[in-house]
């Protein structure tokens, strides 16, 4: 079992942090081998942000994502740039406000940013809302593992709110069409 | 030119964040190709933390660090675990309070944690102090690039203090024996 997950959007959306939490959930709390990778280059100047998480039962010898199983996109630009790496059977989770076009077989448009703004007054926790939705849709990790990992990786004063954001993400994925 | 840099210590020391800042400094502000990688597994339960940054003039086809040029260690455990991957000609930067034994040719023991505590009252900014020292000793990136990258990657209210931490790191490296 090797799963490649990509989180993509714009800088400041907290995707690296979300990747860390996902990676720790799988690696520390579900005993998988996990590698997280992010690239930085001149193209990142425009604010593009992407992190890949590879989760496997066995040692990961080649840590570069090639056939991505799940892509989560929080911007149109990231859809346009990264969809090409999606497996034929892969799925795409997109924010339905920021992403208007996504030409893939299995697309889940979710109102992540809209619901986050509604509940928390701003988009600060959208990265965690995304993680909840990702777990609910893909079952790649359990929400409980995410809970544990999250508590290690966000400022203590924000744990409660982040846990609520996680639950919101699960809920959004449950009520999707 | 391909340089492999490893930042290692315990969880909570902010090494992933330091790696992000280093990677962005080289990738965005010095037009290099950069990949940052971190592994998560059951061994991370004990609080071990490590991130590798590969900086290159050309596209990085194999993103796993094998022959590390520079290892920075903020704990004895990380020295014991990761020194084996150091190049024969590589250098090691260690915190002189947390690391007591380091059997390598080119070791720079620096009072990073002690000076950080003295200046800021706690160790919160030690990761940034380390970056300043790393830049001063290795010249892998300029301090100016680190300044720019840092401003994008720490909470706005903490930028000033982080810039002071960067300067402290440069200073510590300059006055070393």
Image (cartoon, coloured by chain):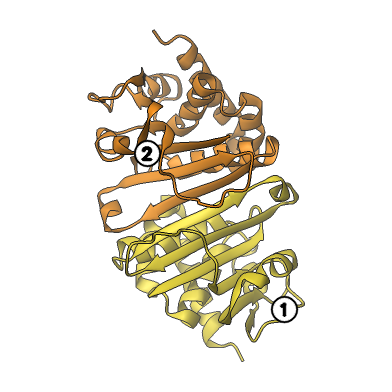
Chain colours: A orange, B yellow
Where residue A79 appears, as percent x and y from the top left, is: 28, 34
Disc 2 designates what residue? A8
* Residue at 49 percent of width and 26 percent of height: A134
The reply to whether label 1 and label 2 mark residues of one chain is no
Placement of the N terminus of chain A among the 4 image quadrants: top right
- Looking at the image, residue A109 lies above or below residue A176: below
Q: Which mark is residue A103?
A: none
Q: Quadrant of the C terminus of chain A?
A: top left
User: Which secondary structure, mark 2?
Assistant: strand
Q: Nearer the viewer, residue A24 or A121?
A: A24
Residue B3, image x and y in percent?
Answer: 45, 72
Q: How many marks?
A: 2
- Residue behind mark 1: B102
* A131 is higher (above) or lower (below) than A168: below
Using the rendered view, name the quadrant where residue A120 is placed: top left
Taking the image as shown, residue A151 lies to the left or right of residue B130, namely: right
The one of A14 and B5 positioned closer to us in this rendering: B5
Q: Distance between the Cα atoms at labels 1 and 2?
A: 39 Å
Kindly state the secondary structure of the residue where label 1 is placed.
loop
Mark 1 Cα shell of 10 Å, populated few (<14), some (14-19), many (≥20): some
Q: Would you place residue B169 above or below residue A8 in this image? A: below
């Amino acid at each position: 079992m090797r799963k490649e997950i990509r989180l993509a959007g714009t800088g400041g959306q907290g995707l690296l942090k979300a990747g860390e939490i996902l990676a720790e959930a799988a690696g520390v709390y579900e005993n998988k081998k996990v590698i997280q990778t992010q690239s930085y280059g001149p193209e990142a100047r425009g604010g593009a942000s992407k992190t890949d998480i590879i989760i496997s039962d066995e040692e990961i010898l080649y840590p570069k994502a090639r056939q991505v199983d799940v892509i989560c996109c929080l911007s149109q630009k990231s859809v346009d740039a990264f969809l090409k790496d999606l497996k034929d059977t892969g799925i795409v989770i997109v924010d339905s406000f920021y992403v208007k076009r996504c030409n893939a077989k299995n697309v889940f448009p979710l109102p992540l940013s809209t619901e986050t703004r509604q509940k928390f007054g701003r988009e600060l926790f959208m990265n965690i809302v995304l993680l909840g939705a990702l777990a609910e849709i893909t079952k790649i990790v359990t929400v409980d593992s995410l809970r544990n990992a999250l508590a290690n990786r966000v400022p203590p004063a924000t744990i409660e709110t982040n846990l609520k954001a996680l639950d919101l993400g699960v809920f959004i994925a449950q009520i999707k069409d």
